[in-house]
Image: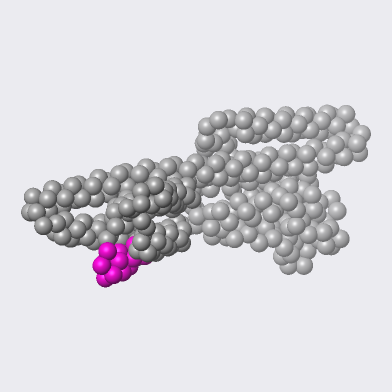
């Protein structure tokens, strides 16, 4: 238990139980005073009852407050010259509460003070044998109550730890599901973008061979979209944790090759600038960079200028892998009119930023020069 838990509040059930026990104790005394004429409740009895209720109220504020209150109440009653059984019983109960809910130093000091008080009560007896028996009995009771409280405290902490681990496990599963949902969005959006462009291309082709080739590519992307959907749905319905094997093929080099071919097939020349060792990147980083390339390529195909319309049209991939981080940038030419429709505001790019930020990277997307657009990822960890 940490120092921040010194003033931890016990459960309401414990407070209710203690309150009922001491109210019952007082009511029994009150009943005895009505039945037995020789037994009467003095003003001290009411004072003791009030002090116990005060300590229970302090216990509702925090364990340490109740411990201090019980010691002050005990000292006050001793100065007034009376000691009661219920007062001693309350101190013993508070030893168990302190053992279960307070810091090690607090519970040790409090148990020592209560033990000293019990020895003091035994010392008040006149018979030495009675003193020894009473002191031993009270010391044993203090030890048993302390050990029971510690056992309960350990069990409670173990249960709280298990609950925290369960909550964290559920959060981790939720994060994995959100990640897969983003991957599904990115994959399907990319494939559907390619399919739409190729379908438009087919409608404008007259040669049967060219049309057949475009239809073949459309069919490939349809199968690819279906495969992405099947894979992600299988992972979403799996019971175990999602491993890196569920993301096979999503690596940086595969992405550069695949998306370069798709961009070139859309009529945009592609160039690459690569430095560093891709083997130094962890599978998770490969997967993230693959998704960055996929989202960037989707935006290039959607908004980029074609060479048939703009001879200066181009798309440039730049990757720099350093010892502890990797930078990636995708720069493409855009036409002035589409340039006003900021693709950086798409849901895919927002998901891209969340994914990259999780690995310490910053993402920037916006105009680059007069007629270019850039998506850059800087400072991503390599592990």
Q: How many marks?
A: 0
Q: Nearer the viewer, residue 358 or 64?
A: 64
Residue 261 image point, x, y percent: 69, 42
Which quarter of the picture shows residue 90?
bottom left
Taking the image as drawn, is residue 191 in sight? yes
Q: Was residue 138 drawn as part of the magenta stretch in this picture? A: no
Between 155 and 117, the one lying in front of the other is 117
Could you tell me what secondary structure mostly forms the magenta stretch?
A: helix
- Where does residue 327 sit, x and y in percent of width and height? 56, 57
Q: Quick one: quadrant of the N terminus?
A: bottom left
Q: Quadrant of residue 226?
A: top right
In this picture the colour scheme is: one colour
Task: Determine whether 69 is above or below 246 in the image.
Answer: below
Image spot of residue 281 (x, y percent): 49, 48
Task: Say which of 366 and 128 sits in front.
Answer: 128
Q: Residue at x 66, y 61 (%)?
A: 364
Which residue is located at x 58 percent, y 30 percent?
Answer: 238
309 over 167 or under it: above or below: below
Left or right: residue 329 versus residue 311 is left
Task: Indicate whether residue 72 is drawn in magenta.
Answer: yes
Can residue 194 be spotted in the picture?
no
* Residue at 78% from the left image edge and 42% from the top image edge: 193
Q: Residue at x 79, y 33 (%)?
A: 218
Spot the residue most to the front.
Answer: 37
Please state the extent of the stretch shown in magenta in the rendering: 69-82
Q: From this view, report whether residue 191 is shown above or below residue 69.
A: above
Q: Is residue 349 left or right of residue 74?
A: right
**Where does the image place residue 278, in percent across and percent down from the top left?**
50, 47
């Amino acid at each position: 238990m940490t120092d921040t838990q010194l003033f931890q509040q016990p459960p309401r059930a414990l407070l209710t139980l203690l309150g009922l026990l001491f109210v019952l104790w007082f009511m029994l005394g009150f009943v005895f005073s009505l039945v037995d004429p020789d037994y009467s409740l003095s003003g001290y009895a009411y004072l003791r009852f009030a002090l116990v209720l005060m300590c229970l109220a302090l216990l509702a504020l925090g364990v340490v407050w109740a411990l201090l209150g019980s010691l002050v109440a005990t000292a006050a009653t001793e100065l007034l010259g009376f000691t009661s059984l219920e007062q001693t019983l309350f101190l013993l109960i508070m030893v168990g509460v302190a053992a279960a809910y307070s810091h090690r130093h607090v519970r040790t000091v409090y148990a020592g003070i209560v033990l000293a008080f019990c020895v003091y009560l035994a010392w008040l007896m006149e018979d030495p044998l009675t003193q020894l028996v009473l002191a031993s009995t009270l010391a044993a009771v203090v030890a048993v109550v302390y050990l029971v409280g510690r056992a309960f405290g350990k069990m409670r902490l173990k249960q709280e730890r298990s609950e925290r681990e369960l909550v964290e496990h559920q959060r981790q599963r939720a994060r994995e599901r959100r990640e897969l949902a983003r991957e599904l969005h990115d994959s399907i959006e990319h494939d559907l973008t390619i399919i739409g462009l190729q379908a438009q291309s087919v409608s404008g082709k007259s040669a049967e061979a060219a049309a057949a080739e475009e239809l073949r590519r459309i069919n490939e992307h349809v199968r690819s979209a279906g495969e992405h959907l099947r894979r992600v749905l299988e992972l979403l319905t799996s019971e175990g944790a999602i491993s890196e094997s569920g993301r096979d093929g999503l690596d940086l080099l595969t992405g550069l090759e695949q998306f370069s071919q798709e961009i070139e097939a859309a009529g945009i020349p592609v160039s690459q600038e690569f430095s560093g060792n891709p083997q130094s990147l962890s599978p998770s980083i490969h997967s993230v960079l693959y998704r960055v390339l996929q989202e960037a390529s989707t935006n290039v195909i959607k908004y980029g200028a074609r060479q048939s319309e703009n001879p200066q049209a181009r798309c440039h991939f730049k990757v720099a892998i350093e010892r502890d981080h990797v930078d990636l940038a995708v720069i493409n030419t855009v036409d002035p009119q589409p340039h006003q429709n900021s693709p950086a505001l798409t849901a895919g790019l927002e998901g891209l930023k969340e994914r990259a930020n999780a690995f310490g990277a910053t993402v920037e997307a916006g105009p680059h020069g007069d007629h270019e657009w850039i998506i850059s990822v800087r400072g991503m960890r390599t592990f």
